[in-house]
Image (tube, grey):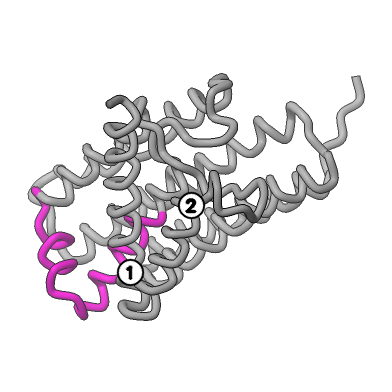
Amino acid sequence: MKMKLFTVPNIITCFNLIAGCMSIICAFNYNFLWSFLFILIGAGFDFFDGLTARILKSYSDIGKELDSLVDMVSFGMAPAFSLFCFAGYYNIFPGNWSYIMFLIPVFSALRLAKFNIDTRQTEEFIGLATPANAIFFGSLTYLASTSSYRVINYAAYNYIIISILVVLFCILMVSEIKMFSFKFKNTAIRGNLIRYIFVIFTVGMALLLDFAAIPVVIMVYIATSIAKNLADRR
């Protein structure tokens, strides 16, 4: 059976993989800004490969599998190495405690495998998406390396807080909590109200806090999704 490997969406997905590899290289060189930026670039490619596939109607099983394999590098391994190298560079963790970071790729793999066979996740996510998890930890290491934000520094340089965050986010990735997605099917307010509110909130926080807005926005996104789940159950 002949398979098309080099479709436009698959090529975009491969650029995501390159971005993930570059993020890991930057982490090993203690360049936490570019390690984080390459995670963001990878997330951009991850968005556009799906968008391109929908526009061109270029869907394939190989594209679906390739996407998960690439996400494992860009959003599983990359943030773990960023955290691991950050902790080693600043000597934050006692002994071998820093290896807890590698729970991130383990749970990312579980999350991606679950996503591939879960037919419920067409309009919203069930569990925290791996790009959101990667962006959170990537931004945390970069912001802490700049030493410009007291609250972030306190969290990032405390191995107990970092360990709790890693475990918590890993649990969220494989949880059954519904997380709203930013996929707009139309421009109508009805059905998209929470998306519009969150986009406005994100832009406002970015203007106010610059890069420091990223972990705040992701935490608020998680809290909003949990609150929405509780409200729906009631």
Q: Which residue is drawn at 28% across and 53% down?
A: 219
Q: How many labels does the image show?
A: 2
Identify the residue under disc 2.
Answer: 193
Most extreme residue toward the right is 2
Looking at the image, residue 46 sits to the left or right of residue 58; the answer is left
Q: What residue type is labelled 1?
A: Ala
Q: Which amino acid does label 2 sit on?
A: Leu
Identify the residue under disc 1.
Answer: 213
Q: Residue at x 22, y 39 (%)?
A: 168
Specify the quadrant of the image occupied by residue 87.
bottom left
In the image, residue 150 lies in the stretch drawn in magenta: yes
In the image, residue 125 lies in the stretch drawn in magenta: no
The stretch of residues the image draws in magenta is: 135-160
Quadrant for the C terminus in the image = top left
- Residue 107: % across, % down: 36, 32
- The residue nearer to you, when weighing 136 against 107, is 136
Looking at the image, residue 20 sits to the left or right of residue 155; the answer is right
Q: Which residue is drawn at 56% across and 56% down?
A: 42
Residue 10 appearing in the image: yes
Q: Residue at x 36, y 28 (%)?
A: 174
- Residue 192: % across, % down: 53, 49
Q: In this view, does 212 lie above or below 198?
A: below
- Residue 96: % across, % down: 15, 43
- The residue nearer to you, when weighing 66 against 168, is 168
- SS majority, magenta: helix
Looking at the image, residue 161 sits to the left or right of residue 52; the answer is left
Q: Earlier in the sequence, mark 2 or mark 1?
A: 2
Q: Is residue 171 above or below residue 39?
A: above
Q: Are marks 2 and 1 in contact (CB under 8 Å)?
A: no
Marks 2/1: CA distance? 21 Å
